[in-house]
Amino acid sequence: MIKCSWGIFAYNEEKNIGQLLQAVENQDLNQISIEEVIVVSSNSTDRTDDIVREFASKNPKIKLIVQEERKGKSSAINLFLKEAKSDILIIESADTIPAKDTIEKLVLPFSDEEVGMTGGRPEPINNPRSFIGFAVCMLWRLHHKMAMISPKLGEMVAFRNLVKEIPEHSPVDEASIEAIIRNNNLEKKYIPEAIVHNKGAENVGDFLKQRRRIYAGHLWLEKNQNYKVVTKKSGLIIKLTMKELSLNIIKDTKIIFTIFLEVLGRLLGWYDFKILKKNPYKWEIASSTKDLNRS
């Protein structure tokens, strides 16, 4: 039996934290044991903390840590790393929902001592018929294809309990953990069957807000941890994107629209980091991504 500790990180997540904790309790487990579920709530001002306390009152494995000041997700992760006791650690944002068998599939690979980190496959619930929904789904589809070639892990990851802390001002926490795992000469493994549902932006403003923040974060990662994620490999991105094109004028128009937004987001992220010297480790919330309605 492989034991794990699960960390969930929340800031004003009253719309999703209840169904996430329900998904935690409904996991199908055979060879994996969830020893503890630690929710770090960073200065939430809505009902997030009350909802977590309701679950904790009925399930002793669920614990709440209240961070009085919001200092960014990496700071919250470091609080979890200090408290977690299991050999395998899982981190997940509170605006996602794992499938019923995700933990089993995410953690089982650690029976191989060479594996240091695993990541599941994010699947957005956005409607691909809209322009923004199409862009969100296309980017995560490309993320999946790139991860199959060279593991790029995000949204929900598991790793060995050898990461004592990550840089507090890292704006790309999972990638910072990837860098530490690499430095320990352990393997990363992408688990496409371990599904985690998320929700992308529903408007252009939130889409660009996320894309510029992520790109600025990857520039920070290169400078501060000397690590480059696979999505920075422009040749691979172009090759995979070209394969998305078809002779369908509506679909190809949406692809061109997505490319334009991604390029613009990267340019804005470059400007933020290189010119304005901004580090988006405590980022502005994209509000349209916060209500996961899976019905």
Image (cartoon, grey):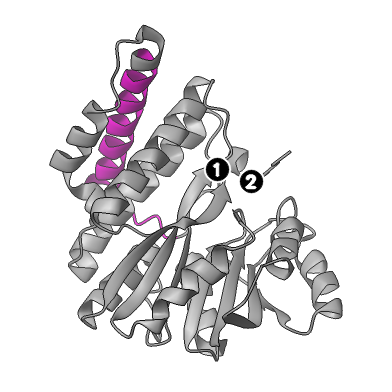
Please name the amino acid that badge 2 sits on: Lys
Q: Determine whether the residue tagged by mark 1 lies in a helix, strand or loop.
A: loop
* Vertical placement of residue 166 versus 70, above or below: below
Name the residue carrying label 2. 290
Q: Quadrant of residue 14?
A: bottom right
Q: Position of residue 190 (x, y in %)?
A: 36, 61
* Left or right: residue 99 compared with residue 162: right
Residue contact between numbered discs 1 and 2, judged by CB atoms under 8 Å: yes
Q: Magenta segment, which residues?
A: 253-281
Horizontal side, residue 231 vs residue 105: left or right: left
Viewer-proximal residue, 77 or 57?
57
Residue 30 at x, y percent in the picture: 61, 77
Q: Residues within 10 Å of mark 2 (few under 14, many from 20)?
A: many
In-image side of 278 versus 134 (left or right): left
Outermost residue, bottom side: 85
Location of the C terminus (image quadrant): top right
Is residue 254 part of the magenta span, yes or no? yes
Residue type at the position of mark 1: Ala
Estimate the spatial distance between the alpha carbons at disc 1 and disc 2, rounded to whole Å: 8 Å
Relative height, residue 179 to residue 222 (above, below):
below
